[in-house]
Image (spheres, rainbow, N blue to C red):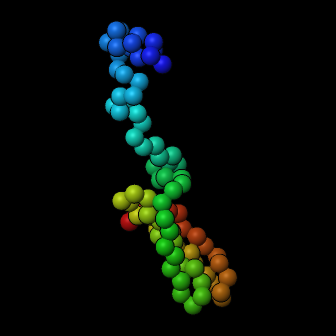
């Protein structure tokens, strides 16, 4: 490692431990720009049925809604940014 550090410094390159070279955050997103993982969920219920899922990723909230007919799940919305 010492040789690599000296070679980088001699060539005018940044030190390998330089924080400016580190990736601070990576978010994997889908085709609509919505993150595909992480965050936390808060679920909403009515009459014993799941009716909403609010997903917080960082400082952004997304929500999806569930619809029922005669107590049977019949629809699920896409994630929508709040």
Which residue shows up at 67% across the image and 82% down it?
A: 72
Residue 55 visible here:
yes
Image side of residue 12 versus residue 66, left or right: left
* Residue in the picture at 34% in, 14% down: 9
Residue furthest out toward the front: 2
Which quadrant holds the C terminus? bottom left
Image quadrant in which you'd find residue 58:
bottom left
- Residue in the picture at 42% in, 43% down: 25
Residue 38 place in picture, x, y as percent: 51, 56
Q: Is residue 69 left or right of residue 77?
A: right
Does residue 17 lie above or below 40 as drawn? above
| Relative image position of residue 68 (x, y in whole percent) | 61, 81
- Is residue 80 depicted above or below 29 in this figure? below
1, 18: nearer the viewer = 1
In this view, 25 is above or below 52 = above
Residue 16: x and y, percent?
41, 24
Residue 32 in sight from this viewpoint: no
Q: How many numbered discs sit on the rendered protein?
A: 0
Name the residue furthest bottom: 47
Camera-nearest residue between 56 and 33: 56
Which residue is painted at 63% across and 84% down in the image? 69
The answer to which of 45 and 12 lies nearer the viewer is 12
Q: Is residue 35 above or below residue 23?
A: below
The residue lying toward the viewer, choosing from 11 and 3, is: 3
- Residue 40, image x and y in percent? 49, 65
């Amino acid at each position: 490692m010492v040789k690599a550090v000296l070679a980088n410094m001699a060539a005018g390159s940044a030190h390998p431990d330089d924080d400016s070279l580190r990736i601070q955050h990576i978010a994997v997103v889908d085709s609509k720009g919505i993150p595909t993982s992480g965050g936390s969920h808060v679920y909403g219920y009515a009459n014993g049925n799941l009716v909403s899922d609010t997903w917080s990723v960082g400082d952004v909230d997304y929500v999806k809604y569930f619809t029922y007919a005669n107590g049977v799940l019949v629809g699920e919305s896409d994630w929508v940014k709040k």
